[in-house]
Image (tube, rainbow, N blue to C red):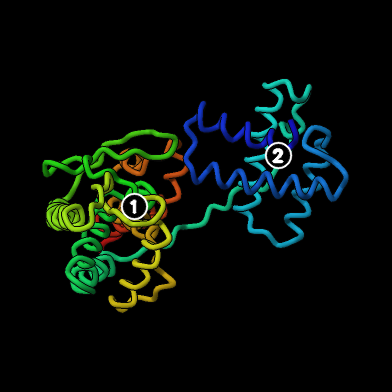
Amino acid sequence: MNEAERITTFLDAQVAELNAARNTQMAYARDLKDFLGWLKTRKSGLLTVSQTGIEDYLIDLDASGLARATRVRRLSAIRQFYRFAFESGWRRDNPAIRVKGPAPERRLPGTLSEDEVERLLEAARETGRLNDRLRNTCLMEVLYATGSRVSELVSLPVTAVRGNPKLLLMRGKGGKERILPLSEPARLALSAWLERRDALEEAARKNRGVPPSRYLFPSRGRSGHLTRHRFYQLVKELAVAAGISPGRVTPHTLRHAFATHLLSRGADLRAIQTLLGHSDIATTEIYTHVLEDRVKELVLEHHPLARE
């Protein structure tokens, strides 16, 4: 088995044992391919590199100006690979087990005000042809109502929304499922798009013999559904229509707005963790800056010494 085949075996095991998401698998494949290429320039290999060699690789990444988040992910891929290599008997040691990498950056996520979100939703309702308006309104309303990840939303099966549900079963990272409540505007947008989508699917079946799609947001591309990249472009277009700088708006910004607005209105951090699908509450705690502002406001408004 050559080194490229060992990487493929590792990636296949990640999917089989951990149900790793396709995006994670692709990222790990790129990271390990880059690491392997670097090793070859040093006349080394996956089964011979030492801890010092891995640390030298990370130093080179830093010197080349690679973003901290990318370096963190590269090291994560290397650690996972060598844990698997050790357990599979490819190596008698794990050279990555004691390697210390850069701490992940704890940046405050960019978000939007409630008024800006409403302007985006209004732009979705008014921009483009009827089919586009109904689909885009559904996308934006459901995204803001649930705080779902983009990949979760665009790949949503149509069966998940049949019957006008009040709750949505969402499959997230690692195949983990969570229940998300739907707001009334989101349910209305879903119903309107579903009716139109089904009519379009039926016309395509009758006129061109096209089989029905299993996705809520079908596409003629290889994936069969609207891609993350196309949705990213749509959100930028809607931002321009809403008079908001497109540099401030991505689909993930709506996920941050969902969490930020709930917290600012008194939602519990644990509940936000569950809704966002975070396995560790430490990930959710990045939003605590909202709670700090709210605590200050409560003290200034209710504490007797804060009154004039």
Q: Mark 1 points at which residue?
A: 225
Bin the neighbour count of mark 2 within 10 Å (Cα to Cα): few under 14, some 14-19, many 20 and up: some
Image: 99 above or below 200: above
Q: Can residue 303 be seen in this view?
A: no
Tell me which amino acid carries mark 1: His
Judging by the rendered image, the residue that carries numbered circle 2 is: 4
Place of residue 35 in the rendered image (x, y in percent of width and height, measured from the top left): 73, 46
Which residue shows up at 43% across the image and 61% down it?
Answer: 229
Residue situated in front as seen by the camera: 238 or 147:
238
The reply, left or right, for residue 118 in relation to residue 112 is left
Residue shown at 66% from the left, 37% from the top: 7
Q: Quadrant of the C terminus?
A: bottom left
Residue shown at 77%/36% (left/top)?
A: 46
123, 135: nearer the viewer? 135
Q: Is mark 2 on a helix, strand or loop?
A: helix
Label located before the other in sequence (2 or 1): 2
Q: In which quarter of the image is residue 140?
A: bottom left
Q: Nearer the viewer, residue 35 or 50?
A: 35
Q: Would residue 129 be visible to someone looking at this image?
A: yes
In the image, taking residue 173 as reference, residue 165 lies left or right, namely left
Residue type, mark 2 in image: Ala
Q: Quadrant of the N terminus?
A: top right
The CA span between labels 2 and 1 is: 31 Å
